[in-house]
Image: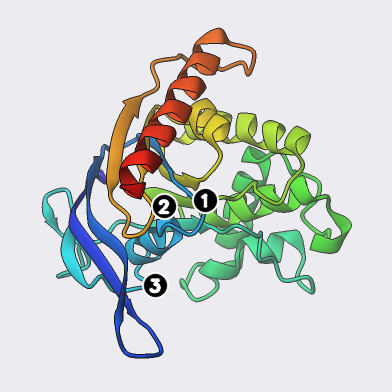
Amino acid sequence: MANISVQHLVKDFSRADHSALQVIGDLTFEVQDGEFIAILGPSGCGKSTFLSILAGLEQPSGGQILIDGKPFRQNGNHPRLGFVFQQPRLLNWRSVRRNVILPLERSGLSLEALQTLSSRYLELVRLSGFEEYFPLQLSGGMQARVAIARALAVEPDVLLMDEPFSSLDEINARKMRAELIRIWQETRKTIVFVTHDISEAVYLSNRLLVVTERPTRVFETLDIDVGYPRDYEDDRLFELSKKVSRIFVKMEERHGN
């Protein structure tokens, strides 16, 4: 189980003149176990910073995160997390298999267990047969699959994804989004997916948070009540994308004021 409650989260950074830059301000929302939630906001608004806080890479300046009702990262209370970054961040001198098992090399698992895990998740992302290839021998889409397999190999409760398809052309990005939905349906992992692409957020998620520019807070929450699998030509998704676009216009008008 990994029900996440983000309560009044704040994150400040210090400027060169020692004044405070508030990147996240009073961010509050919940993520239910097994949910696919998209966080949609303007570039540079603090979405990636939030993922870094959730991953334990940054400390918040205020507020709290609860996991199943208990303070996050206190007394060992934290879910197992997998992180997929904007770039695949693969090591070019390591094979695909050795990239996948990299985060597990100090886990104490046997070589046989590591090979079993890597094979399981490479099969899940449809890269069986590519175990001994190297990253530079793969297409961008295939590298993205390796990154997802690596994040899943730690068998996370929650999968954090920071614009993982932003470097792909639209044709390959669409293929990868469809693959991600398949993987989510097969694993039922909780996914928190950050993006600034409206159509991507609508296509992927079952709930969408529209967040403001800095300091980031939730502006509006929208349920995406369209069943899976989804079709880009579905008029319901098109209408929802238009609705989100209107929300953005309203948000910018209010933020500007």
Q: Is 101 in front, or is 141? A: 141
Q: Residue at x 33, y 61 (%)?
A: 54
Q: Residue 51: percent from the left, percent from the top?
A: 40, 59
Identify the residue at the far front of this view: 257
How far is the residue under mark 1 from the one under mark 2?
Answer: 6 Å
Dot 2 falls on a residue whose secondary structure is: loop
How far is the residue under mark 2 from the one under mark 3?
Answer: 16 Å
Marker disc for residue 156: 2
Report the quarter where the N terminus lies: top left
How far is the residue under mark 1 from the one under mark 3?
Answer: 19 Å
Q: Residue 193: percent from the left, percent from the top?
A: 46, 45
Q: Please give left or right for residue 35 compared with residue 132 in the image.
A: left
Residue that mark 1 sits on: 152
Tag 1: amino acid: Leu
Q: Is residue 22 above or below residue 251?
A: below
Identify the residue at the far right of this view: 137
N-terminal of the two: label 1 or label 3? Answer: 3
Residues marked 1 and 2 touching at CB (< 8 Å): yes
Q: Residues within 10 Å of mark 1 (few under 14, many from 20)?
A: many
Identify the residue at the far bottom of this view: 17
Q: Residue 141: percent from the left, percent from the top?
A: 75, 45
Q: Is residue 85 above or below residue 219?
A: below
Q: Residues within 10 Å of mark 3 (few under 14, many from 20)?
A: few
Residue that mark 3 sits on: 57
Give the image quarter of residue 93. bottom right
Q: Residue 234: percent from the left, percent from the top?
A: 58, 11
Identify the residue at the far top of this view: 235
Q: Is residue 225 above or below residue 180?
A: above
